[in-house]
Amino acid sequence: MSVTTLSAPIMAHRQQSWLVRLFDYKPFLVVMCLAPAIGLLAVFLTYPLGLGIWLAFTDTTIGRKGIFVGLENFQYLLTDSLWWNAVFYSVVYTGIATFGKFALGFWLALLLNNHFPFKSLLRAIILLPWIVPTVLSALAFWWIYDPQFSIISYLLVDVLHWRSSNVDFLGSPWPARFSLIAANIWRGIPFVAISLLAGLQTISPSLYEAAMLDGASAWQRFRYITFPMMMPILAIVMTFSIIFTFTDFQLVYAITRGGPGNSTHLLATLAFQRGIAGGELGEGAAIAVSMIPFLVFATLFSYFGLARRKWQQGESND
Amino acid sequence: MTDTVARPAVADAKAAPDTMAWDSGLRRLMMIYLPLGCFVLILLFPFYWMAITSFKPNAELMNYKEHNPFWISSPTLAHIKHLLFNTAYPHWLWTTMLVAIGSTTLSLIASTLAAYAIERLRFRGSPYVGLGIYLAYLVPPSILFIPLATVVVQFGLFDSPMALILVYPTFLVPFCTWLLIGYFKSIPYELEECALVDGATRLQILRRITLPLAVPGLISAGIFSFTLSWNEFIYALAFIQSGANKTVPVAILTELVTGDVYQWGALMAGSLLGSLPVAIFYSLFVDYYVSSLTGAVKE
């Protein structure tokens, strides 16, 4: 329709300079179109990634060029209890937070898949924790976890009388660790819920009808239809979630900065502390690089999980 | 495309007999509304707490015995006034806005062109370029910030918001390209072919046919980029040194958190004000946001 109206001015432009004809030459146009994106990514992503791996094998510090020291940084990390501590907490943090986010997010998605008034408004409200800058909501959590004026302590002590003293959320290792995990779960639920809701809406209702005719219970319908049909999308969302939870930085940096007594350092915050704050660029880079094997493992794991499911279902890929 | 649109409608029709069969009103209340209410309460509570703290006078803030902590008896604007007139907060907001707009513009241009080339120009190897850009999204900033800091210093951009404008596209471009490829895919090829037959150049086709049809995609890519750059923390923390050039999230944490006694009122007011621009921006386009988020995941 609009094509016919367009053609007149286009014809008028026919006789044009060599420049326009150059842009009509497809290989040139392809290169020109890709240049900005590839250029930016090459300079600010691929090159730094390579540089980071190189730095991990040097003893560079801020203001001084380092020399190649081979595996020395990594050998040192293996003897460093803080690094082991960070690996341990990163794994715990990722494991529990991912589990929590997916269990609660899936539940919320199933709830949102029902029918009730103001549905789209509710979806919009629910996404807020995901939209608001993490550091700013982390500050709210920091205040909620305040040792003296925590609102949770107030509820537990003064309103419900369940405890006799305030909870010291961030003062000792395990409570601090779980407080951070709770904040991370809170922040992650909306994204998981909305993504899984999208997946739920693509499941054909005829499957449920058939199962109902066969007398399947609600649980059986979930177990044998919903869950397997959701597997591909679960795998994708989970890969993302694992990668970004494992490499999280903001929440921990804003709430505990790795404390108390370095017990809540994630690999990313430890890398920051050593590399930027402490000036040991080489060592910081080595800590950052040590995250890569975990990330590759997580990606491959869910990629193959996904591939297997696809093969089982015979190419239904949505 | 058509069947994804049709499906939810069918799902609606199906829900009715299902609900009648086993849901009494009470059961529905207990199984759906009650848990949903709890979710909403928990997900929104920190914002409520943030908001209420921003307007509480210090006396009420630290005294739960005489004042109900969930309410404000005598609201005050003191914290916000302090923030706006005694700190560099307006300047931080301005910097954050500048960085978010700059990096969003840059990313939109780069990723629109890239997505057009990958999806529409179809050259040999275009799927691999697409895959490469997608994989770039999986490289997290916490692996890159140390080497990037040295790159930024090499380019003489250390402590300059320009560094952030140039670096943020590394996570924005992969995401936007991925989103826009999906939008371009949904535009019928015939439209472009007709224009090509009529003698339009490829750039004219992009400008006058493909881009106008992809406007919803451009809007959602823009919202995502804006919110993601407003959110960004680790690069801004590592590359910006001087107080005046900081972005809101970094500045609040490094400039407002001072000493042992935290200024909770001012901190929460800062968080609230820093969240508002994204929240407002997001609420204007929430439908695009939700549909593209779900669309991107479905791909």
Image: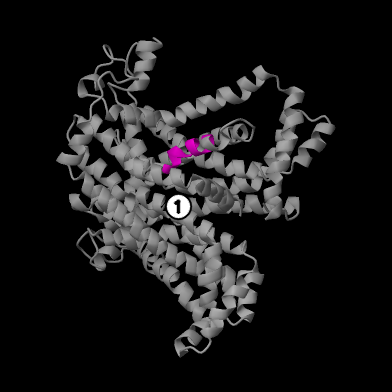
B236 magenta-colored: no
Depth check: B72 or B99 in front? B72
- Tell me if I can see residue B239 in this picture: yes
Say which residue appears at 25% left-offset and 67% top-offset. Answer: B154
Q: Which residues are magenta?
A: A122-131
Residue on which the image places disc 1? B224
Spot occupied by residue A167 in the image (x, y as percentages of width and height)? 34, 20
Q: Residues within 10 Å of mark 1 (few under 14, many from 20)?
A: many
- Tell me if I can see residue A249 in this picture: no
Depth check: A179 or B27 in front? B27
Say which residue appears at 56% left-offset and 47% top-offset. Answer: A237
Residue B251 position (above or below residue B176): above
Spot occupied by residue B217 in the image (x, y as percentages of width and height)? 52, 57
Q: On what subunit does the disc labeled 1 rest?
A: B
**What is the image's colouring?**
one colour
Depth check: B59 or A77 in front? B59
- Residue lying at the far right in this picture: please name it: A214
- Dividing the picture into quarters, in which one does residue B123 lie? bottom right
- Count of labels shown? 1
Viewed as shown, does residue B61 lie left or right of A12? left
Viewed as shown, does residue A315 lie left or right of A130? right
Secondary structure of the residue carrying numbered label 1? helix
Overall secondary structure of the magenta stretch?
Answer: helix
Spot occupied by residue B164 in the image (x, y as percentages of width and height)? 31, 58
Which image quadrant: the N terminus of chain B? bottom right
A124 magenta-colored: yes
Spot occupied by residue A188 in the image (x, y as percentages of width and height)? 48, 39
Looking at the picture, which amino acid does disc 1 mark?
Phe
Depth check: A176 or A207 in front? A207
Say which residue appears at 57% left-offset and 60% top-offset. Answer: B183
